[in-house]
Image (cartoon, helix red, strand yellow):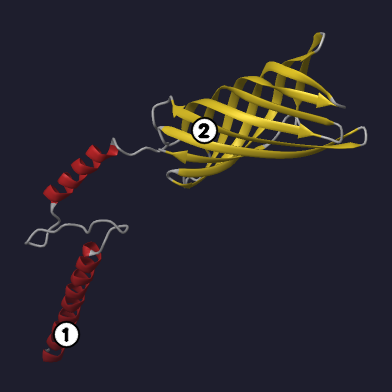
Amino acid sequence: MKTKTLITRLIYTLFLSFLISTNFGCAAILDAELNGLEPIPFTKEGLIDLNELAKRKERFEQNADNINFYPRNLAGVSAGFGLNSVEGESETSFCIGGEYSYRLSQDNYNRASYVNLFANYGSQSSDQIDQNTLSAGVGYTLFDRITSNAEVDLTYGVKAFYETGSYESFGFKEDITGYGAQLLIGANYNVNDNFAVGVTVPFLSYSQRTFEYDGGEVDVSNTWLGLNKDNMVMAYARFGF
């Protein structure tokens, strides 16, 4: 009988020791930082401090208004380069530009829409031909987030522009004026909250140009579908503020 009682007490002692050690272990876990943020608050009695948690929640909600999933403003620089061959003559082209974008939509995690102002300088040259243009215009871009870690967006856009420049062929020079529009798709990679890199692909473009020379002028309109020297892929760097 005494042996049974002793064994029972030993079991109770071991069980109580287990509970005590578990309690201290849980307290240590709960007292640790939560996701690297503030530690869970406890009262002097060892209970979770609900009043402090409520205050933290209130502070978070007050600061939430200052958190932007997409920047209100974007400043961007762009560049593109192309090679082409026409009737055995090689042609090279490049384009550099800059743009400013302002977010129109209410801020949310999934998508954002921007209105854009942009300016580009482009050059095309071959053995006997040189063309230089300066264009400026307005656009609209939709950012559509496709990854849960907020790193990658698909972009869809439309641009309209006016351009001016010069065209020189075999020693004869002509002045260029015109206008055009583009539909674009692209991808945007967010390096951090305020810096991103990406590409845009104009899959459909239209332009209307007037070439003026001594004694007259010629109107030329063109439509491009797909990628070529006049429908250039552009690489972007965007800065948010």
57 or 131: nearer the viewer? 131
- The residue under the point 54% across, 28% down is 141
Who is closer to the viewer here, 24 or 2? 24
Image quadrant holding the C terminus, namely: top left
Q: Which residue is mark 2?
A: 143
Mark toward the start of the polypeptide (1 vs 2): 1
Looking at this view, is 233 or 55 the one in front? 233
Query: At 79% across and 30% down in the image, what residue appears?
Result: 130
Locate residue 117, reporting x and y percent: 52, 25
Mark in front: 1 vs 2: 2
Q: Position of residue 213 (x, y in %)?
A: 80, 14
C-alpha separation, residue under disc 1 versus residue under disc 2: 67 Å
Does residue 148 appear left or right of residue 137 in this picture?
A: left
Residue lying farthest top? 216
Q: Is residue 228 something that shows in the picture?
A: no
Tell me the quadrant of the picture where the N terminus can be found. bottom left
Q: Amino acid at mark 2?
A: Phe
Q: Nearer the viewer, residue 79 or 196?
A: 79
